[in-house]
Image (cartoon, grey):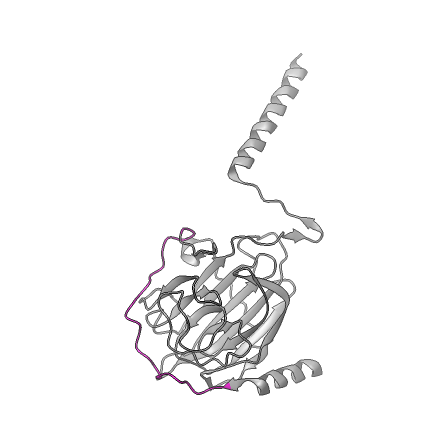
Amino acid sequence: MIYKGLFIAAVTAAATVAWAQEPKDAPSSGNSVEPQPRGVISDNFGYTFTDSAAGNCALDFIDISGTGAEIVAAGVDDGASAPISIGTDFDFYGTAVTQLVMASNGYLSTDPTDTGPDLSNDCPLPAVPSSGSGARIYPLNDDLIASGGGFYEYFASCPRSSDQFPFNDLGCHVFQWEGATHFGGGGPFTFQVVLYDESYEIVVQHLTGNPETGSGSTTGIQNAAGDDGLTYACDSAASIPENSAQCFIHPAPAAVGIGEQAVPTMSRGGLILMVMVLMALGGIVLVRRAG
């Protein structure tokens, strides 16, 4: 408990507040992207997305506000955490990520020097950020205040099962924006990002209280160069409803196993072939018994 308290104090003390170099509460881009057919749209790397409306990306919120380390102090505006080591390599656009910065303005960055000032969301992705750098995960990029703080926790056994590998006991990293508010008013509302070991799945989960529901924000991912990315939705009314989840699926997850035993995957064609072989073997057994 003492070590955890020292860790929280050290990280909170290292959190940087950087006053924005761009206008506060900037107007929307004038563009908009609504959620497209799930699992069909992909970026050049091969990421696809689905959501809770499609029924295969469950809303199963992991509340870490009482157990996680507070890495962004309550009330921070246009600031970010110190770089957070995520321990195990997480593949993001083909690059092993070992640390992330959590910005009060609703994004995660792989750039350890990012102080979190990017408040004007880009729409659509990919786009070179107006401020800051690094590959980005945007659960809800907007001009936000971390009114309730930002929290981080790692689970060796994730309380929320992976949607891709529900029978595998995967670890996960959770970043939670607790009781966030919009600059100028609106909220509070809570949302989080869940990053899975081995499957590299990225899950965004939103609770209630956000009055904009996506009308002035961006939800999506993009690489460090800002030339490849996937927009779930941006600057589109009612695109991020309350109590919803969005899942970004990595095209090449690592071998996923339970303990030391890997769980094989099988295509539909392979499954059909296996059934046909079993039926043929069953027929041979019946013929022999009849003889």
User: What is the x, y in percent for residue 43?
Assistant: 43, 56
User: What is the x, y in percent for residue 56?
Assistant: 47, 53
The residue at the point 42 percent across, 54 percent down is 42
Nearer to us in this view, 74 or 290: 74
User: How many labels were placed on the picture?
Assistant: 0
Q: Is residue 36 magenta?
A: yes
Q: Does residue 211 appear anywhere in the picture?
A: yes
Relative horizontal placement of residue 227, taking residue 89 as reference (left or right): left
Main secondary structure type of the part rendered in magenta: loop
Q: Does residue 1 appear anywhere in the picture?
A: no
> Which residues lie in the magenta part?
17-40
Nearer to us in this view, 129 or 235: 129
The residue at the point 63 percent across, 85 percent down is 10
Q: Quadrant of residue 274?
A: top right
Nearer to us in this view, 266 or 291: 266
Relative horizontal placement of residue 240, taking residue 259 as reference (left or right): left
Relative horizontal placement of residue 217, taking residue 205 as reference (left or right): left
Would you place residue 31 above or below residue 147 in this image? Answer: above
User: What is the x, y in percent for residue 11?
Assistant: 60, 83
| The residue positioned farthest toward the top in the image shown | 291
Q: Is residue 122 magenta?
A: no
